[in-house]
Amino acid sequence: MADADRVTSNSKSDIRNPGIFTTTDRTKWAKIRNQMLLNRTNHDSIKIVESSAFCFVLSENCPKNHSEEFRDYLTGSGFDRWFDKSFTFIVNKNGSMGFNVEHSTTEATLGGRMLEYALFHSKYDADGNPADPVHRSHPSIDQPKPILWELDEYDEDITELKKEWGRLANNLDALVYYMPKGKGMIKKLRVSPDGFIQMAMQLAFYRERQVTPKTYETAATRLFKFGRTETIRPVSTHSVAFTKCFDDPSATNEMKILH
């Protein structure tokens, strides 16, 4: 905690943070990165960031609900993320915490497993108080040091990318909704929770657009050697018939059940 306080008290504005470069397309970022590597200070700093196991963000944000949290973890300000990094841990000022994951090297389930492990071993009660306070000694480690950058020549790029990222982030709508009964309620109806959610999404999309598109669902293959994911296509002639029948005023309940 002392190190965290030291970092936040000594941090400056993120207005020149090169993390904003990682928000743009790969070609543009590659050109900027190659140019930055020609500068010794930037070269060394890039290597520090890219060789790290993960990034850790101490955010001043205080999301009011899960939807705000989700949106913030996904986008941030653009400056306070390094989107090439496999894992970025974000801790907000109000104590909420989440992940930003770069998907090409890992699956989302790994982040979930890490959080489950941390929660299981945190030993906090339901009110957030330490269940078994223990004073532990910590090994002597170096104090955190700022990573230095020389970015004067990139002012125009930073300004442009800040506007570009703002447009992209503002185009995102995020709503996190928890079902009051969970999957147990669905199972009592002798229905697959996965199938229930898939059909709910197809029905919602059909109501919005009057069409059913190709749909992707992940099939985990991580239990097999070199396995990651495969694709499930949950849309079928039967699912399309169901969505059309569901809102058909002339359809009876029996017809809907048959579909």
Image (cartoon, grey):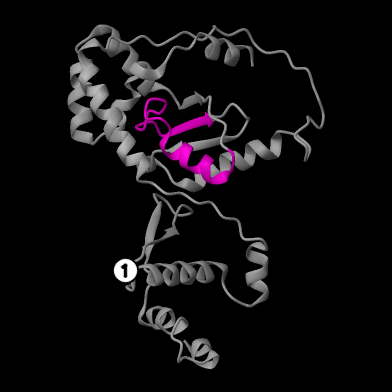
Indicate the position of residue 11 as horizontal and vertical percent values.
48, 12
At label 1, the amino acid type is Pro
Pick the front one: 161 or 220: 161
Pick the front one: 222 or 207: 207
Residue at the disc numbered 1: 213
Indicate the position of residue 93 as horizontal and vertical percent values.
59, 26
Indicate the position of residue 95 as horizontal and vertical percent values.
63, 30
Quadrant holding the N terminus: top right
Residue placed at 68% from the left, 63% from the top? 181
Indicate the position of residue 241 as horizontal and vertical percent values.
39, 83
Direction front: furthest residue: 249
Q: Which region of the structure is painted magenta?
A: 64-90
**Residue 199 visible, this orientation:** yes
Residue placed at 60% from the left, 56% from the top? 178
Pick the front one: 131 or 28: 28
Residue 162 is inside the magenta segment: no
